[in-house]
Amino acid sequence: MSNVYLRPAEWSDVDLLYEWANDKQVRSNPFNTEIISCYDHKHWFENYMADENTVIYMLCDTESKIGQIRLDCSEHIAKINYIISKRYRGLGYGEIIIRLVEKKIVIDKSDIRCIKAIVRSNNVASQKVFEDNGYTGTYDENEKHYLYFKELTPINSGITIDCKNPSGGVLLLTNNRNSLTLYDALKETGEDITIYSDSIDDELLAIESPKYVISYNYTHIIQKRLIDYMCGKMLNIHISMLPWNRGSDPNFWSFIDNTPKGVTIHLIDEGLDTGDILCQKELTFNEDNETFRTSYNALNDAAVSLLLEHWNEIVNGVITPISQPTGGSYHNRRDFHKYIIGKKFNWDMVISEFKREC
């Protein structure tokens, strides 16, 4: 379902929409159960095309038209009504179309503050879709229907999509081509994965709605509200045995300070490499044989292997995160430049030779 998207309805869709609208099951749910005439339908569609307060989106994939959803907007409220084609019902597309239209509203119609939907009492499937997507429902005994509401927050004030029900794939944040090894490896497992290198914001997460965010060799600071939005599904890969060598150049400092070496996968929090640990692997190196570059490459390979080994456990929430031990160490980029001033250094030097010169 990763290729499913919404697009505005066009005149070429009118006949298919007419067919869907008169489907037997669809007509059993609306409040007007009479069969719609072709003339009335096309007249309605012409009016819709001219009405700036009404929008119809088609839910499509690369080959098929799956459903439609209509927005009737007034006074900061969008009333929604959707139809899924008979052949696609029961496959989760109702939930998908709701999430996608929420993103459209947040990004394209910033004046909308609330979504409203009316669902007949016998339409249990639609009731479940709205309830699972965070809508508040009340039952009207007189009218025999459920009224669902969901408040929205403008995108520049926060995120509106429910983090507990992500619809997208994996978002890989990186500024280093070394991370492409991880990208390729996850791609081979069948994951829908996207690479992003700029600073992430509310709009990106609203558009992508990722099931997981992985930070790997990523240089941008991630804001707390975005971390909170992901509800513990934002992790970082760090090539050190945390809590040792947080921050910059962890591999270099592990040799200079003679601290433990390895790789850590941890949850992201407000600190720098301070989040709870999901898994770790310690490595040992022969400093007489290894260079800084070969040891760095070995750590990156180990990081990819560690993530792949535990990926299903991470995604399924099997691993219990543990707090980092107290102590450890931290270095920033300035520390590295200050340390190598006046020293002969390059990344291909044998580690023990560099340390002897120091």
Image (cartoon, helix red, strand yellow):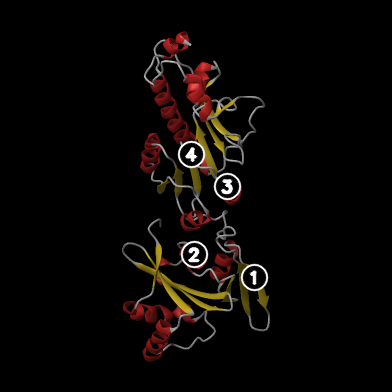
Residue 354 to residue 146: above or below = above
First along the sequence among labels 3 and 2: 2
First along the sequence among labels 4 and 2: 2
> Residue furthest toward the top?
356
Helix, strand or loop at label 3? It is: loop
Residue 240 locus on image (x, y percent):
52, 26
Q: Which residue is mark 3?
A: 223
Residue 282 seen in the figure: no
Q: Which residue is mark 1?
A: 137
Nearest to the observer: residue 332 or residue 321: 332
How far is disc 4 from disc 1 in space, using C-alphas? 43 Å
How far is disc 1 from disc 2 in space, using C-alphas? 25 Å
In the image, which disc is placed on residue 219?
Answer: 4
Helix, strand or loop at label 1? It is: strand
Residue 250 locus on image (x, y percent):
51, 26
Residue 284 locus on image (x, y percent):
48, 17
In the image, which disc is placed on residue 337?
Answer: none
